[in-house]
Structures are given as C-alpha cells and as structure tokens.
Amino acid sequence: MSISPSDESWEVLLSLFPSNWREQARKLGAVERLRGFANIDNLMRTLLIHVAQGYSLRETVVRAKASELAAISDVALLKRLRNAERWLRSLCLGLLEEEGVQMPPLPNGWRVRAVDGSLVKEPGRTGSQWRLHYSLQLPSMLCDHLEVTAVQGQGTGERLHRFPAQRGDLVLADRGMCNPVGIGSLRKRRAHVIVRLNTGALPLRGGSGEKFDLLAHLQSVKRPGHIAEWTVQTGEGRAPISGRLCVLRKSEQQTQRALRKIHRKTQQGGPKPKPATLAYANYVMVFTTVAATELTAQEVLEWYRLRWQIELVFKRLKTLLRVGHIPKYDDQSSKAWLYAKLLVALLAEKLIRIGQTLSPWGYLLPSEEASRQAKTA
C-alpha cells in the first residue's frame, strides 16, 4: 500500500518527538477521552494545523474533517488546546534537554525566570499587531506569566515592573529592560535581577556614591575571556540600588561582529556612533543585584549566557509567532498556544540538526517500542 506525502512527512516529524510523547498525553491530562479523534496522533496533527499553519480554530476543524483527522467543533478544539498546556510544555522541555542546555548551580530555593517581550502580528493585510510579554522559568520551561497588550499606549511597553515577582526570584533580562525603575520595583519585592547593561538608561555610581567612570574601569580588562567586577550603585533619591557590574572581554571575532552591527545602523541612516559606544563593543557588561557571596562574577555571566541561549530559541519562536491567530480567550489557552509554537520551533531545530550531521536520509528511524506505541495509541 502506498503512503501519501502528508503521511510520510508526519512519520518523519514523529521521529523527532520524545519517545514517551503519547504516554505523556494521558499522564498530563491532555487526553482523557478521544471523542472526535481516532488516536493521539490525530489530536497532535490537528493542534499543529492550528498553531503551525496559523489557521483559526474554525478553519482548522474544517481542514481536519476534510483530512479525516477529526470531527469536532471549534469550541471543542479550544478545550483540547487548553487541556494540552502541560503536555506541550513537557515536550518542549524534553527537546530542549536534548540540546544539552546545562544550568549553572544556584543557591537552594531560588527560582530563575527569563523575561522578554515580542511584537506579534496576526495574518493578513489588516491583521492586528500585539505585544506579547512572557516569563519563562528555568530549567522547568514553565511559563508563569503571559500577557497580550496593544503595541501603543500607556502601560504597554517592555518593562521589568510589569512582571509579578516575589522573594527568591532571580530575573534574567536583556538591555531593553535595564532601567532604575524596573530594577527598583523588583528589589522592593525582594527579587533579584541579572540584566545586560544599557549604558544610556542605567546611570552608575561607585559603591560609595562617587562618580563611576565606566570607560576607565574597562581599560583594565584587556585580555579576551578576562572577567572583572565592581561594586556599583544606581537609582535616584535616598534609596540607591546596590549591585555589581560584571564584565567579560569578548573575543576579537565577536567584537568585530558587534562593530559591524553598529556601523550598519549608521549606514542605514542612524546617528554616527560615539567613541564610547565603539569601546563598549569589546565587552559583555551585566548588572546584577545578587551579592558576590551568592554568585561569583563568572556564575552571573553564565546565567546571563544561558538566558541568551534561550533567546536563540525564542528568535525562531518570534518568527513563527508572526504567523497565527493569537488565542486571547484566557491565559491557559494562550500559554498552550505559546508552548505549541515553541514545540514547532524546537522540532524544526532538531530536524535541521539531524539532517545536517547525523543521518544521510535526514531523519531518525523510529524505535520498535515507538512503533508499538503508535499502533496501540
């Protein structure tokens, strides 16, 4: 019996899934009854039609019925998506662990959260544009905060203080969220932060309140890979925010890459870079409120590097996010939709990696156990 191209593609995609993905569907509550679906495979295929292809719920169920994958309503599919949140998250975590992401050590009881924001556009010439704010716990990949706002207007920007936080949180953020207001808001809630330094938005003073000459201090960090740290203060008023500036000298290759990016902006009509901006391109500079007794400068930079590794995943995710109808019904469906998008991105990464380095035919052969599970699912 011949196999259709769509079924063949599905078999290739299945070879990329974690081996226990069907078992996890039942264990994590995504499947109690398969009403409307012949098996778990058809449920996953239908969810991916909705998320990966960017179809609305109504269009998805029409296409699923035409393909003999499912016979359900759009309301029933939305419920399935909500129930799949934990299942989809577990699959993302499994694929991420396969990539060998290692977590640096942390003091007991800390909760690490990477926060970010992204512009998202719904399909079509008149599609609405939204800003997605999310917080992701590491290493559990638990999305503990997700909010969709308008792009313009008061309270819609990417800010640290818009995220809930509590004592024991360690928040990792990029330079777009580096400012005294956001950092101060986290400290008032007894949370800590590791954030890439934005020299234009975060004024620094020495540990005793004196002027901090950043360029002069950087002069001592001359060797690529050399790490240095200084006690600093930021913020205004009577309650300055104490912290540390942790700095790493980049390799020559990475420095040249950063300089090319700066000059490219000038060629595109941007302002001529200041000498200080060109000097800063030699370094990775991170501000943290974590004490040296808790994390060394190297460990602080390692945690920031890990945030960047997660950011590499989300760069692909953000591209996918621009194609699709954002489910704005409730937090649970939005989070499930986000995990499904991340699953697609991670599957694409794995397919590229396997096709280029491991297999002459571009995918993994299914194990005998996986074949037996597929027949009984």
Image (cartoon, rainbow, N blue to C red):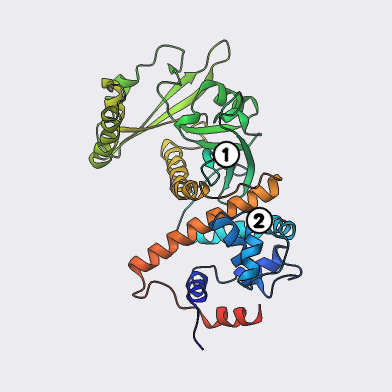
Seen at 50% across and 23% down, the residue is 179
Height in image: 263 above or below 114? above
Height in image: 20 above or below 301? below
* Residue 64 position by quadrant: bottom right
Distance Cα–Cα, label 2 vs label 1:
17 Å
Is residue 344 at all visible to an observer of this figure?
Answer: yes
How far across and how far down the image is residue 194, in percent?
A: 49, 34
Circles 2 and 1, Cβ within 8 Å, touching? The answer is no
Q: Badge 2 local density, few (<14 within 10 Å), some, or many (20+)?
A: many
Residue reaching furthest bottom?
1
Seen at 42% across and 35% down, the residue is 297
Choose between 283 and 64: the one closer to the eye. Answer: 64
Is residue 22 at all visible to an observer of this figure?
Answer: no
Earlier residue among tags 2 and 1: 2
How far across and how far down the image is residue 360, in percent?
A: 33, 75
* Left or right: residue 295 compared with residue 199: right
Choose between 130 and 143: the one closer to the eye. Answer: 130
Mark 2 is on which residue type?
A: Leu
How many numbered circles are shown? Answer: 2
The residue beneath circle 1 is 128
Which of the labelled discs sits on residue 57, or is there none?
2
